Image (cartoon, rainbow, N blue to C red):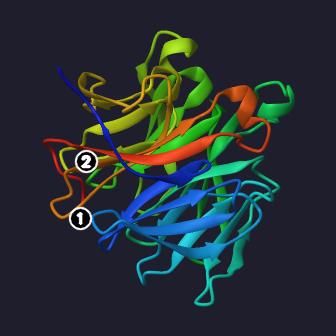
């Protein structure tokens, strides 16, 4: 197994989520500040692509380039408009509580996770389903018993969906058919303890490796589809949470990490803390 530490490349954020690489730019949401950023890391350029005060989180891109964003506060899927505003594509309040992260496939289907209960106010953990929204805005749910399903991504062939269950500290997989329907729910990797192995964001590389963040351990782990851990990347500062990841850069071999100086108690106070973007070079490139 290989191990390395990341380097800080940008700071000045509060709490970043939804990291995605798209057309030469890193996109991410600053949840408490209500901003969606598009970033050119090599140039150090940060632009605000949209402002939305409903706690923006997961991001994705439709086949025509339309930017989609999930908002936690009202559990909605929105599109970002040319003027930097948003329009609701699908209201998810009937099936989600705290809609969270998202992956959008090549056909424009959005696979959306959810916190699933009132995490920051002492709510009891609830098992919840995955949500799939069609390009036409039709909403369906699949699976059962997912506890805080969080990071989400597809295998290179699009036939397997990976989901990080934060408070079950495990990776779960589903089979995906040609219509986007999910079946075959199964545990891909069960880790050992919440304290060391809670999982959050994830991304998938071109060889099918799954990079998953472990915020309480301040590291990102790469797993093969059989659950073997092959690589780890630690945060530049020990003790910082690592929340979300994306593979990008000129050769798609830069692992971008959204990290945060915070804790769960401070997060309950509107994500109190500071956030930054860190990076490390890895062997296997992401998917173009």
Q: Residue at x 43, y 81 (%)?
A: 65
SS at badge 2? loop
Quadrant position of residue 140: bottom right
Locate residue 61 relative to residue 282 in the image: left or right. right
SS at badge 1? loop
Furthest-bottom residue in this view: 82
Q: Is residue 38 above or below residue 247?
A: below
Q: Quadrant of the C terminus?
A: bottom left
Q: Residues within 10 Å of mark 1 (few under 14, many from 20)?
A: few
Q: Which residue is mark 2?
A: 205
Quadrant position of residue 132: bottom right
Residue 288 disc label: 1
**Depth check: 154 or 32 in front?**
32
Nearest to N terminus: mark 2 or mark 1: 2
Q: Position of residue 176 (x, y in %)?
A: 42, 51
Q: Residues within 10 Å of mark 2 (few under 14, many from 20)?
A: many
Work out whether residue 136 can be spotted: yes
């Amino acid at each position: 197994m290989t191990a390395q530490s990341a380097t800080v490349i940008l700071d000045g954020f509060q709490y970043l989520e939804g990291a995605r690489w798209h057309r030469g730019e890193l996109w991410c949401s600053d949840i408490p500040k209500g901003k969606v950023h598009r970033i050119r890391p090599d140039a150090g350029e940060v632009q605000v692509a949209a402002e939305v005060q409903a706690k923006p989180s997961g991001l994705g891109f439709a086949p025509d380039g339309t930017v989609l964003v999930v908002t936690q506060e009202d559990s909605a899927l929105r599109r970002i408009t040319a003027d930097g505003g948003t329009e609701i594509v699908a209201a998810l309040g009937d099936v989600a509580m705290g809609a969270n992260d998202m992956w959008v496939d090549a056909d424009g289907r959005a696979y959306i996770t959810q916190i699933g209960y009132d995490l920051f106010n002492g709510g009891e953990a609830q098992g919840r389903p995955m949500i799939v929204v069609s390009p036409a805005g039709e909403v369906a749910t699949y699976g059962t018993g997912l506890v805080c399903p969080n990071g989400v991504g597809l295998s290179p062939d699009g036939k397997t969906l990976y989901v990080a269950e934060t408070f079950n500290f495990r990776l779960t997989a589903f089979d995906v058919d040609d219509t986007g329907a999910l079946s075959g729910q199964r545990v891909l990797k069960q880790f050992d303890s919440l304290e060391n192995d809670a999982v959050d964001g994830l991304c998938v590389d071109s060889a099918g490796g799954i990079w998953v963040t472990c915020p309480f351990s301040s590291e990102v782990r790469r797993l093969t589809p059989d659950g073997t851990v092959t690589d780890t990347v630690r945060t530049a500062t020990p003790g910082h949470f690592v929340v979300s990841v994306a593979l990008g850069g000129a050769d798609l071999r830069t692992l971008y990490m959204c990290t945060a100086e915070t804790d769960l108690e401070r997060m309950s106070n509107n994500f109190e803390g500071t956030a930054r973007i860190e990076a490390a070079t890895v062997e296997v490139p992401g998917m173009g």
